[in-house]
Image (cartoon, helix red, strand yellow):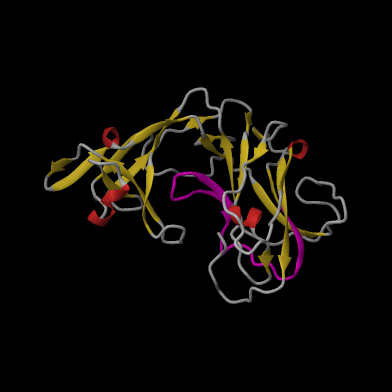
Amino acid sequence: MIWGDLDAPGLTLPGTELEADLTVPWTAAAIESCPAGMFPFAQKTLGNVWQAESELAEGTLYVDEIDWGDSLESVDMKVGRPIRVELSLYKTDLTTPLTGYGMVMLANPSSPDEVQGVCASDLVLDDGVTTGDESTINSYASTEATVNSPTARLVIQKIDPALTYSWAGTSWESADTPVSLTFSGELNVGGKVIYGLSRGGWKPTAVGTYRVTFYLPTDLGQETWFDGSTIIRTAIEVAEEGEAGGDAVVDPLNNLTYIDIDVIAGGGGGGGKPVR
């Protein structure tokens, strides 16, 4: 991870950088998740803690790639169906690689209860407890890292796709009133910084075209920027129902990226899990 705009880091990481304490191995049923001779240790488990290497940005940090959530790019949305809006920023050309710990899936993939962990070898028995440390974890050198900027903001507005809009610093002029939402950055189960909505995601209440805009304010001593080289990372998932979803755009002049999505009828109300 790269730390940007450190006046207010916004995230607290577990443990100490490049240190680990592994005392609770995962169930034997998941041993096949690890390379031969290694054993899995689940995250968010009392007795297991680790922190991979991170780096402080020196001066201005330019983002190389933007990864919008696959669901926004691949599937049209439906009224009343909660949508989890997610986005990550990447540096992909680190001169000095950072040490990462290889994460493996242990249980409940692609669900709110998903469990991931690390693999470790050369374990020792300490007072009857099988333990490992940072020297035993399956690690790798990475030239790619996600970017954390606590100044990041998100705004969602209904628009007329036939019109052109001007950015006014915090929203698009002449577009509808922004949707009320709670937005922040967090570490996901795989150890990446993801910016997203909380409280069950966003649930559209009317059909139409909506512009979802992620921006980094330019009037706050901003140190994290998009430029002419910043690109959108292509969606991995393909729509199951033939819907196209939206196409993301980078606007480096206003230090923002947006995606226009169509919300169609159907989907019902009720609680349901957010689209991931």
Q: Which of the pair 18/241 is nearer the observer?
A: 241
Indicate yes or no whether the magenta region holds residue 246: no
Horizontal arrangement in the rendering, residue 119 relative to residue 108 (left or right): left
For the point 70% across and 44% down, which residue is it?
Answer: 257
Q: How many marks?
A: 0
For the point 56% across and 32% down, which residue is it?
Answer: 92
Q: Which of the 4 image quadrants contains residue 175?
A: bottom right
Whether residue 56 is visible to the viewer of this picture, yes or no, is yes
Horizontal arrangement in the rendering, residue 34 relative to residue 217 (left or right): left
Residue 127 position in % (x across, y down): 11, 45
Q: Which of the 4 image quadrants contains residue 239?
A: bottom right
Indicate yes or no whether the magenta region holds residue 201: yes
Residue 135 position in % (x across, y down): 28, 32
Residue closest to the far top? 95
Q: Which of the pair 164/32 is nearer the observer?
A: 32
For the point 12% across and 48% down, which residue is it?
Answer: 128
Residue 134 position in % (x across, y down): 30, 35
Q: Which of the pair 48/16 is nearer the observer?
A: 48
**The magenta segment:** 184-212
Residue 157 position in % (x across, y down): 76, 58
